[in-house]
Image (spheres, grey):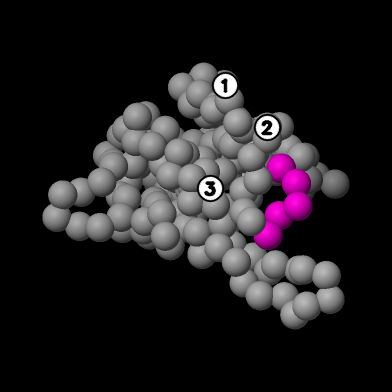
Amino acid sequence: MSSVTVKDCDAAEFINALAAHFKQSGKIELPEWHDLVKTAPFKEMCPMDPDWYYVRAASLARKIYLRGGTGVGAFTKVYGGASHNSVRTPHFRKAAKGVIRHVLQQLAELDIVAKRKDQKGRWITRNGQRELDTIAGQVMSKDEPSDEEESEEEDE
């Protein structure tokens, strides 16, 4: 059996599975302001999904896994978007740094990401890589049809 990494599975499925894992484990504590805060200045309201914090944590963990050394400033650009103010031309605005910083601190407490002394940004840890690869393996095994289903399809 070959090993499965985060790069092998679909991003949306992996992020949803990892967010569900974070929620079930109870290791990530939701801040008091999670239901009130806007994720960016160009947003009009707070997120409608009650589990948005877990989804953002999973997305950040995946992005750090794929490209280590990324910092808070780079993530503000990744999660930024267009600001539509009345009739004026839309312009790009960065996302809220505080939300991203808080999520990264929570991931650091879980030993999924960490800072390195000699380099900038956040990097995935060995424990984090192991945990994310485990979730990726679960996602890939759920996607693959079993041998019984394949033989039934061939008979028809």
Please name the residue that numbered disc 3 is placed on. 59
Specify which label sits upstream in the sequence, 1 or 3: 1
Give the residue at mark 2.
Answer: 35
Relative image position of residue 21 (x, y in whole percent)? 54, 28
Mark 2–mark 1 CB contact (< 8 Å): no
- Look at the picture and state if 67 lies above or below 110: below
As drawn, the residue found furthest toward the left would be 118
- Residue 101: numbered disc: none
| Three-letter amino acid code at the position of disc 1 | Gln
For this rendering, which residue is in front, 128 or 114? Answer: 114
> 59 or 30, which is in the foreground?
30
**Which residues, given as a range, are shown in magenta?**
42-47
Against 90, is 152 above or below? above
Mark 3: which amino acid? Ser
SS category of the residue bearing label 2 = helix
Residue 151 appears anywhere in the view: no
Query: How far across and down, in percent of the image, does residue 117 sit?
Result: 16, 49
Q: Is residue 145 left or right of residue 101?
A: right
The answer to whether mark 1 and mark 3 are in CB contact below 8 A is no
128 in the magenta segment:
no
Reading the chain from its start, which is encountered first: label 2 or label 1?
A: 1
* Marks 2 and 3 in Cβ contact (< 8 Å): no
Whether residue 15 sits left or right of residue 153 in the image: it is left
Residue, disc 1:
24
